[in-house]
Amino acid sequence: MPEKRSKRMQTRKSPFSRYPELSRLMETGEPVCVTFETGGDENSPEKSRFLFCELVQKARMGEEFLISGQGCPPGDYVLGFSEKSPAAYYLNSGRYKDWKAAENAALSLPRLEKKFCFIKIEPLSLNKGNFDVMILFLKPEKAMRIVQASAYSEGKRTVLDTIGAASICGDCTVLAYRQGIGLSFGCKGSRKHSGYEDFEVPLGLSFKKTIEIEDVLSKLPETRK
């Protein structure tokens, strides 16, 4: 059985959206909700042939998916679908000097520890209220506003933790789920295969952090006023 999918018209002003401030930050498409579903049944979907980052991009434009795997080896490792280290994959990519560097890169990847049955990926307009992570694709100034909103209450810095690999699955999903916010400059795989713009930066927020940021954004002064 292939991954379950459907295509809907984009509805930025959907009444289901409880995050108008965050939605306004995105100029193309809409925020994407990722949910780690724990209730499996006999109709659970099989592994998708698409990469996780590709599925997120498709959801940005209105599609929704249920998957129990995806097509990127590092992504499967990061999301907990596989225990196979992507060190050899990284070495063969030519992006690391030698085996030790490739192995260190693989060991540095964040990994999802939550137990789940499959992953739901959907645009915000189709979400019914609960999710684990929200992913946005933003121009740098808009990403800055989220960082400012995060610092609003306690004045704490946001730490950038990335390696230019496994950006959508690792930085923006797993790290965001774990730490509240995941900043990234993207990675070769996601920029090459999923097609977001060179001027866009991906950013992930946990459900709790999403509520906090949405509440604060309207309180911040505009950048150029």
Image (tube, rainbow, N blue to C red):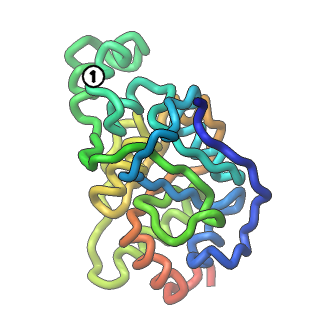
For the residue pair 140 and 109, the one nearer the viewer reads as 109
Task: Name the residue rendered at 28%, 41% in the picture.
Answer: 110
Where is residue 170 drawn, in percent x and y? 37, 42
| Quarter-of-image position of residue 192 | top right
Where is residue 172 drawn, in percent x and y? 42, 50
Total numbered labels: 1
| Three-letter amino acid code at the position of disc 1 | Ser
* Secondary structure of the residue carrying numbered label 1: loop
Task: Name the residue rendered at 72%, 69% in the picture.
Answer: 12
Residue 188 can be seen, yes or no: no
User: Which residue in the rendered view is the most extreme toward the bottom?
Assistant: 219
Where is residue 70 drawn, in percent x and y? 49, 31
Q: Is residue 188 above or below residue 168?
A: above
Mark 1 lies on residue? 85
Where's the N terminus, which quadrant? top right
Where's the C terminus, which quadrant? bottom right
Residue 46 can be seen, yes or no: yes
Q: In the displayed structure, does residue 148 sit left or right of residue 58?
A: left
| Quarter-of-image position of residue 28 | bottom right
Where is residue 213 drawn, in percent x and y? 44, 76
Task: Name the residue rendered at 29%, 44% in the picture.
Answer: 112
| Quarter-of-image position of residue 142 | bottom right
Q: In the displayed structure, does residue 37 sit left or right of residue 80?
A: right
Classed neighbour count for the residue bearing mark 1: other residues with Cα under 10 Å, few (<14), some (14–19), many (≥20): some
